[in-house]
């Protein structure tokens, strides 16, 4: 079973107005895609959630289901269950719903009761912490900007240059990986600017673009970062 086919079917059902069928497939993809293929990790937390939110805007049960998944995951984390992957699920859902403040509140609660976990997921919470204007706290979980950009770009380049991926999937993967890369870079830039390190922010922006090796991906990164 190819999770990508299930996702595409869910998307097609949503566009055709078969909302119940679409929700069933999108929920299956969220809960089971990684059991079949870990390569869908990025797509699951970006485009798949985007499709789900589009459906939720038209079909209230889809919104209820998304909130239900969010609440169950948050409750498990507050109990000390789950780890980095589950926290990233919550972060991604909150981002899609425009509820980044919930991520910030969750992180503060976990920081009081489950400090070890927050040390492991601080980088995932940075975006929400930055949105809350807490740049001092955010800086505690940001590695040295140069080292961090090198790590981010190396990860992006490795994922983009992976061979043996079908063309259609490769295009979707490129969009997802570039999207996630730009989001992480933008958060880094916001922290530097928030701490009034504007020259460092300018240099980091130039470097973040130059470090991307594939030309098409570099153009996508440039367009996304410069437009912000």
Image (cartoon, helix red, strand yellow):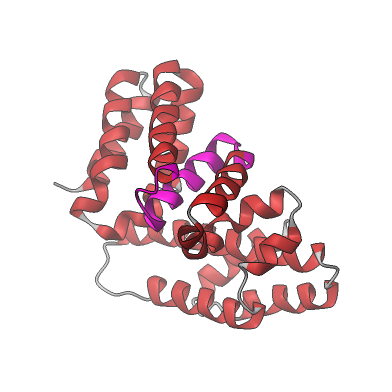
Q: What secondary structure predominates along the stretch shown in magenta?
A: helix
Name the foreground residue: 122 vs 150.
122
| Residue 86 is a magenta residue | yes
Name the foreground residue: 109 vs 159.
109
Which residues are the magenta region? 78-101
Does 128 appear above or below 144? above
| Residue depicted at x 42% and y 30% | 66
| Residue 67 is a magenta residue | no
Q: In the figure, is residue 74 to the left or right of 184?
A: left
Name the foreground residue: 130 vs 154.
130
Residue extending farthest to the left is 1
| Residue depicted at x 35% and y 50% | 82
Image mark count: 0
Quadrant where the image shows the C terminus? bottom right
Q: In the figure, is residue 120 to the left or right of 228?
A: left
Q: Residue 134 location, x and y as percent?
A: 74, 55
Does 158 appear above or below 120? below
Q: Residue 199 location, x and y as percent?
A: 84, 77
Residue 141 seen = yes
Does 15 appear above or below 115? above
Name the foreground residue: 39 vs 87.
87
| Residue depicted at x 81% and y 67% | 195
Q: Residue 98 location, x and y as percent?
A: 60, 36
Q: In the figure, is residue 57 to the left or right of 195?
A: left
């Amino acid at each position: 079973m190819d999770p990508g086919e299930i996702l595409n079917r869910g998307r097609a059902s949503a566009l055709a107005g078969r909302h119940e069928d679409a929700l069933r497939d999108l929920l299956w993809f969220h809960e089971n895609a990684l059991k079949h293929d870990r390569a869908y990790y990025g797509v699951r937390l970006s485009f798949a959630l985007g499709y789900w939110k589009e459906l939720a805007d038209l079909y209230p049960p889809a919104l209820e289901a998304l909130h239900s998944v969010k609440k169950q995951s948050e409750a498990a984390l507050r109990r000390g269950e789950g780890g980095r992957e589950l926290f990233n699920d919550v972060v991604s859902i909150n981002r899609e719903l425009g509820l980044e403040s919930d991520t910030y509140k969750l992180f503060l609660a976990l920081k009081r009761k489950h400090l070890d976990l927050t040390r492991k997921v601080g980088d995932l919470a940075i975006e929400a912490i930055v949105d809350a204007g807490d740049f001092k706290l955010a800086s505690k979980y940001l590695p040295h900007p140069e080292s961090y950009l090198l790590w981010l770009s190396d990860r992006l380049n490795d994922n983009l240059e992976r061979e043996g991926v079908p063309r259609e999937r490769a295009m979707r993967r490129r969009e997802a990986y570039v999207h996630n890369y730009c989001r992480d870079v933008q958060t880094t830039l916001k922290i530097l600017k928030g701490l009034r390190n504007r020259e460092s922010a300018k240099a980091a922006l130039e470097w973040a673009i130059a470090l991307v090796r594939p030309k098409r991906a570099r153009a996508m990164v440039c367009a996304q970062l410069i437009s912000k």
